[in-house]
Amino acid sequence: MKLSEAINSRKTFAIISHPDAGKTTLTEKFLLFGGAIQTAGAVKSNKIKKTATSDFMEIERQRGISVATSVMGFMYDGMQVNILDTPGHKDFAEDTYRTLTAVDSVILVIDCVKGVEEQTERLMEVCRMRKTPVIIFVNKMDRDGKDAFDLLDELESKLSIRTRPLSWPIGIGPTFQGVYNIFNSQLKLFAPNKTKVEADTVDIADLNDPQLAEVIGNEPADTLREDLEMVEAIYEPFDRKSYLNAEIAPVFFGSALNNFGIKELLETFIDIAPVPQARDTDVRKVEPLEKTFTGFVFKIHANLDPKHRDRIAFLRVCSGKFERNQFFHHVRLDKKIKFSNPSSFMASEKSTIEEAYPGDVVGLYDTGTFKIGDTLTEGEEMQFKGIPSFSPEIFKELENLDPMKTKQLEKGIRQLTDEGVAQLFIQELLGNKKIIGTVGELQFDVIQYRLEHEYGAKCQFRALKYHKACWITSDNEAKLNEFIRIKTTDMAKDKDNNWVYLAPSEWILRLEQQNFPELTFHTTSEFK
Ligand code: G4P
């Protein structure tokens, strides 16, 4: 396949939401429409996140939280659609942020009853920071939720983005009947169905067609016409460029559970969403059309089978063509490696691939060669940017409970932190004391569980009162060394051997910044 053809027929995106807004249900419906799965059993017993597709870890089964970020691909209308799944739970927010570095656009799901929730705001902030185009899907319109116009106002004010409805609900709650497709001026009424996507629809192309009132009733037909008039009066016409520049978010309404509004969303998405885009490295911008292959690892996953400790590294192809059994350059290790079993993920199936193109996500078997953020090229020395570590919010000292298993513990904790489960800071000057930093409590459970089940090591954690981790740099080496000496008990090295200052409180941090103006205190690890 020609590179340009491959690029123009790919859409790689993530569905994100506050937990419970309907991300899993929507993903499932997309897969149904894409023919990638045949039926979506009762949502309760057969959620995608509870099947093997994205359920890599026992702990996920136990807790019912989608810890994993997995990839689901399917073909629709000649387009290769790659959905990167993200964990909704806030303790795994960093995982989600990292996944957002590997997509070209995002669908943000909102619950129409709850409106904009805390996680939604945070996720949107990340999208704004990265200028990722966003489509908003307002879900659960079959419930008595907020008025559509009010919701649009709330989206604009809380998410700081202009909106433009591209579909419109007919009724809400018990009277919800479906959506009118503003984007292509069409009404397709689906029979509600929780498990399948039905082909039998009623098509009405003209709003003044008397069939409209026959199908949805006189009053709803009048309301729909009035609402649409108002939409056209209030909102500017849809401009794809503004959407691609992340200045405006198209909004769709529907009910994922009942299939309302999903096809409209999917088809418009296919139409307007960006194809694979250029990406920044520390040296230059890389265009997908470049002939030589480049890519980066944004996610590392423990194997399905905890008895085998190999892992899967998820690589986003950024330019050129990835090929099986071809040697590529691992920039950080300055090493040539080839992959004999690279895999792609088509819905429930994982299969070996011969080649992959920009926008694709390739699963690479990994026995400890990769860390999150690693770059592969055909020889060029450069590192993709945009996958920083953020300062953790919770810090605990790792205590070994079984001295006979020290080696296993060391190896386990290194590998788990390479996977991005948590950050590891080592206090070399204090007898290699290990401090684990996370954004949520849940990660400590994950670490403890996995160290025991995968590495046979037992540990416990001792809470530490730190406020933030700051990466410290300075041109003035003498001052830097002085700071490290004075602050020995609060200094540690991160996974890449960079100095990190663990600030006990916001107040002390500010004080030190004043005392040491020669030093720079970075709140993320991406400062080079
Ligand atoms: P998430 O991945 O964003 O966390 O959300 P998920 O799809 O799991 O959906 C959360 C809940 O909302 C599920 O119910 C799901 O059935 C329900 N839901 C999704 N879409 C719609 C919709 O359009 N209308 C209505 N009324 N409900 C919807 P649950 O009872 O929490 O799930 P389960 O206990 O059945 O697994």
Image (tube, helix red, strand yellow):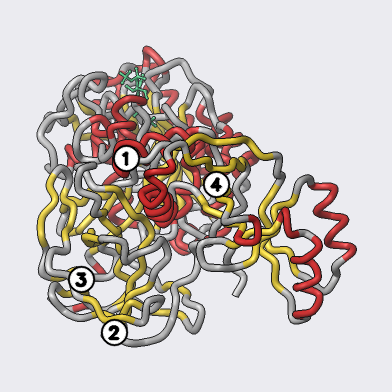
Q: Secondary structure at mark 3?
A: helix
Which numbered disc flags the more N-terminal residue, 4 or 3?
3
Whether label 3 touches label 1, CB < 8 Å: no
The one of 210 and 448 positioned closer to us in this rendering: 448
**Residue 484 found in image quarter:** bottom right
Which badge, 4 or 1, is on the more N-terminal residue?
4
Graded by Cα atoms within 10 Å as few (under 14), some (14 to 19) or many (20 or more), the crowding at tag 2 reads some
The circle on residue 36 is: none
- Marks 4 and 1: which is nearer the front? 1
**Residue 341: which quarter of the image?**
bottom left
Q: Residue at x 40, y 17 (%)?
A: 219
User: What is the x, y in percent for residue 353?
Assistant: 11, 64
Residue located beneath label 1 in the image: 456
State left or right for residue 10 relative to residue 491.
left
Pointer 4 residue Cβ closer than 8 Å to ligand 1: no
Q: In which image quadrant can residue 196 be found?
A: top left
Mark 1: is the Cβ under 8 angstroms from ligand 1?
A: no
- Res. 378 mark: 2
- Is residue 237 something one can see in this rendering? yes
- The relative height of residue 178 versus residue 430 in the rendered view (above or below) is above
Q: Examine the rendering and report whether any part of residue 205 can be seen.
A: no
Residue under pointer 4: 436
Between the residue at mark 4 and the residue at mark 2, the CA separation in whole angstroms equals 35 Å
Which quadrant of the figure contains the C terminus? bottom right
